[in-house]
Amino acid sequence: MSVIVNALVDLGYILIFPGFLFCFLCGMLLCGIERKIVARMQKRVGPPILQPMYDFFKLCGKETIVPAVANKTVYLLAPIVGLAALVVIQLFIPVFNFTAFSGNADIIVILYLLLIPALAEIFGAAATGSPFAGVGLSREMVTIISCELPLVLVFLAVGKAVGNAVGSGVVFSMQTIASYQAEHGCLLLKPSMIPAAIAFLLTIPGETGTHPFDAAEAETEICEGMLAEYSGKPLAVYKLSHAVKMLTLTSLFVALFLGGLGTGVILVDGLINFFFCVVITICVVALMDASTARLKIEQLFKYYWTVVSGLAAISLVLAWYGL
Amino acid sequence: MITFNYIASFFLIALGFYTIITKFNLVKAVIGLSIADYGVNLLIISIGYVPGGTAPIFTQGEITQLSYFVDPIPQALTLTSIVIGACVTAMSMSLVMKLHESYGTLDTREIRRLHG
Amino acid sequence: MSNFMNYIHFPIYSVMVLFLGAFLIVVLGKNKTLRSIIAVLSVSISLACMIALIKPVMVNGEVIAYWMGNRVPAGGYAIGIAMEVDALSLFFGLLISTAVFVSTVYSIQYMAHDENIPQYYTLLLMLAGGVMGLVLSGDIFNMFIMVEILTFAAVALTAFRNRVFGALEAAFKYLVVGCMGSTCILAGTIMLYANAHTLNFAQLSAIIPGNMNTSTKIAFALLFVGFSTKAFIVPFHPLAADAHGAAPASISVLISGVLTKSGIYGIIRLTYFLFQTMGLSTFQFLLVFIGCVSMFLCVTMALAQHDFKRLLAFHSISQIGYVLTAVGLFTAVGFSSGIYHALNHTLFKGLLFLAAGAVLHETGTTNLDELGGLSKKMPHTTVLFLIGAFSISGIPPFNGFASKWMIYQACYQKAVESGNIGYVLVTVICLVTSVLTLASFVKVSQSVFFGRLPEKYENVKEVSFGMRLAMGIFALLCVLTGLFPDLVGKYLTQPAATAAFNASSYIDAMLGEGYAASAMGPFLPAAQNVVFYEAGVWSPMSWLLIMCIVLLAITIVAVTSKYDRVSAVSSGEADAKHALFFSGEEAVYSQVGGSDLFWGFKHNWRHYFSFMHDLHSGILNDYALWAVVDLALVMLFMLIVL
């Protein structure tokens, strides 16, 4: 009997919170808020906050035109795999003290799982056979390479900082990080973690592909690159993936650096988590989106591997020596 | 006598490797490889040497506690090594022949279609 | 006289059946079916013998010491030639026999149109026999002989297709530098003999570590460099790149999956058993340094390649760098993750080379700038290639991820335990290399399988069933070893790691109980109870289950909604609606692949790439110079450090 109850509870986690439905609603809301804030910063009115949802349902009703030269299976399958991987990552990220599937939550695993949505988009683009998609996927791969080094350094720094305090040397488990922060206050209060936090915040626009790091899907240069030949339902799923990715990365930041501020009640924790995500989106993503121009791909690579990695490396060295 | 053998064998090995590095002809590279092999053979056989020992060939019952002979194992190893050296020379010379046939030259600076 | 089916005879069976098969093919090889039957039968018997040994050696922890001709030690002195199979040897033996089996099955169809096919099978079986003899041997001179056999067979097989671009020159360079390495191994062996007057590996392991003098240190350097040549690690990697690219694909599988592992096996036996120097942190630094340089240098070289198989060859050496780094950490988790990665590497690299061979077989070229769009014509090969590509990049849940994840944990744990921040740099290098590997395989996928199909390949068909079966076996093994890392650990890697840390049981099995204790005195290595703590919390099966449920949910929602109109045409019909969008510039459309990809990244690193390109000049003398400089540096290192 309890097995069935456990299975139903797990199914609830997967489908409702923090799974599919939560990702859908909150991701779309984040996306909409970001667009609205950018518009206001540019002295426009901007679309309504629920606009991404309207776009999603509109796209679902359109016809999917598969190009003649495309590989149909990969073309239709890739968006779904990408979205599934993102939802799975969201299931592993703790919401303050609550983790849906604690047995699998491990920083390095999340690092690798974060590759899967970008990879799904790359293979979907490759499958279309379009030259614009070829250029787009090349740039997206370079963006992935650029963002990987700072992320690695940030995760290692966080693992070491928590490990120093807990006494076991190094900690890779998300649940341990969450419980440590619940007892000792959030990691952002430690001065050695501030460069790592800044580095992670700078990585978020790169991963989600917003200005100034959106060389991969440059609308004006390569006709939106990877998504050039997509239409209808698959395109809707890709747009949903972008939105959920924004939610995933911001909640990862909250889990790593702003933990310990929860109340213990799941619903309230969820709202506080979402509030922080909104704040980060406004202050970092929307601000940079509205006020910068697009970087060229080699400038993007250089920026990430020098400035951002340098910040994260400073944090790693400070954490290593126990500061 | 025996120290001289060791010095000579290391000199031969070094000379063989030097030939492979500095000479730009394929046949000279093969010769260098053979010289290095001969140096190792000299080393092997010298290690087994016992001053004043006889050849290690005895019939049943002839060998006693006072028999004084050179070490037979390095001799067996040397024979194996000589054979291997001969095989290496044979295979490399056949490759040199085919290379000359297809590239038209024996200069190592020209035979570099696979690079980078 | 024990029953001939007793399992202690299985090691010698698995070696001799391969040599016997080679001989039979020379005699009976004209008939095609007879030839295939003999080849497949010999490799199957060899594989079966290895699998049958899992229960006594891995599960029960026995070490099989087999004296040829029943010449057991007399007076505490080894007088015969021995084979010794402990868990480490059996692990490598299993790996090798699996790779040889799949390669033989693949060769039946792949080499069907070549000439001199009986000689091919003879050489293949000689190569297999040589490597099996190397890993199962307990006598150091026997190991040298087997190394020579496998070098010859590999050189001959590299040059097998004379008319392939660069085959002869690749074989010649491999022969010259490889034989330089073999000469070093022989010289090292003889210097050890001069010190210990025995050639038996176990007895040497008992005598040498307590009696290190200048000649043994020089011998160590010579042996180390000799086995590095066989493993193709830096600076011997250009030989690998040339040889893999020129050899037939089934042989590339063996060169990358089996020969490199034999070199790594030799290095492990030297450092963990014969000289037992792994306890020194400077020595660990040597192995980790060489491993990291191999990793990073080869993956960046791979990004600049235009040839499919040459790219795969550089990746091969990069993954061997991972193995060497993990082995060099000298921790239980490090060692077991290193050899787990060696197993995975054989599987996924074999799969990738077989896919490259399939592409070459159908299209006649492996040039990345000329291929494109093959997924429509060769769908099964594409899927199998993608499984291999995801495995090597370390995407969950395939096997590459499991072993790489364990390697990262081991590196970072070592950093914490030793307090040395250098190991953190090693971890970062490992992770960055992984993502660069992923980039290379995205490039290959786009250049070969996706994108636009050139007109001249319109008639390409899918490869024959035998070749797909071989690829499918590797792909299935990749997935299985990825989903069940705990089973692989319990039955394969952990017994091997335990064996590596317990050299005294190796010595005792060969020469009698208590020999190690009496002969080595204060230098006896402690019989360590190797503890494998639960490295992390990754559970692949539950992750896969969650992923499947989510996929199912999305698919149900997608399929059952009312607005589901997918408009597609069958291939060939081109109308305006299903054409690609070119914004009016169709005339200048070309395939975006090969050298066009990652332009920005290559621009940033252009000085490095041009320097590396000029350095790998292809001239034999340069490669020989690198070999001699490496020998000199390692010799200096050994003399100073040990």
Image (cartoon, coloured by chain):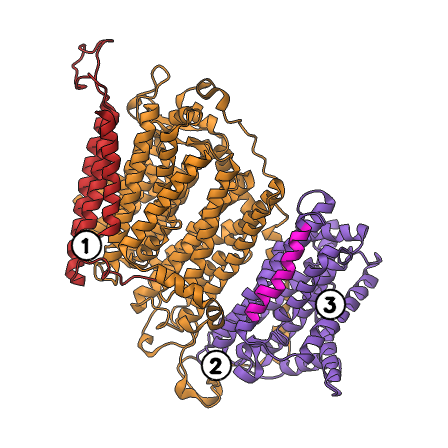
The overriding secondary structure of the stretch rendered in magenta is helix
Q: Is residue C488 left or right of residue C548?
A: left
Determine whether C485 is above or below C139 in the image: below
Q: Secondary structure at mark 1?
A: loop
Q: Quadrant of the C terminus of chain B?
A: bottom left
The disc placed on residue A271 is: none
Q: Secondary structure at mark 3?
A: helix
Marked residue chain, label 3: A
The magenta stretch is: A300-319
Residue C563, horizontal then vertical, whole percent: 62, 81
Which residue is label 3 attached to? A22
Residues marked 2 and 1, same chain: no
Q: Residue at x 33, y 74 (%)?
A: C457
Residue closest to the eye, A202 or A276: A202
Q: Residue at x 56, y 51 (%)?
A: C425
Which residue is label 1 attached to? B25
> Disc 1 and disc 3: Cα gap in Å?
72 Å
Q: In the rendered image, is residue C611 in sight? A: yes
Marked residue chain, label 2: A
Which chain corresponds to the colour purple?
Answer: A
Determine if the magenta segment contains residue A304.
Answer: yes
The disc placed on residue A67 is: 2
Image quarter of residue A273:
bottom right
What is the three-letter code of the residue carrying label 3? Phe
Q: In the rendered image, is residue A76 in sight? A: no
Determine if the magenta segment contains residue A13.
Answer: no
Q: Residue at x 74, y 71 (%)?
A: A26
Chain C shade: orange
Which chain corresponds to the colour red?
Answer: B
Q: Secondary structure at mark 2?
A: loop
Q: Are marks 2 and 1 in contact (CB under 8 Å)?
A: no
Marked residue chain, label 1: B
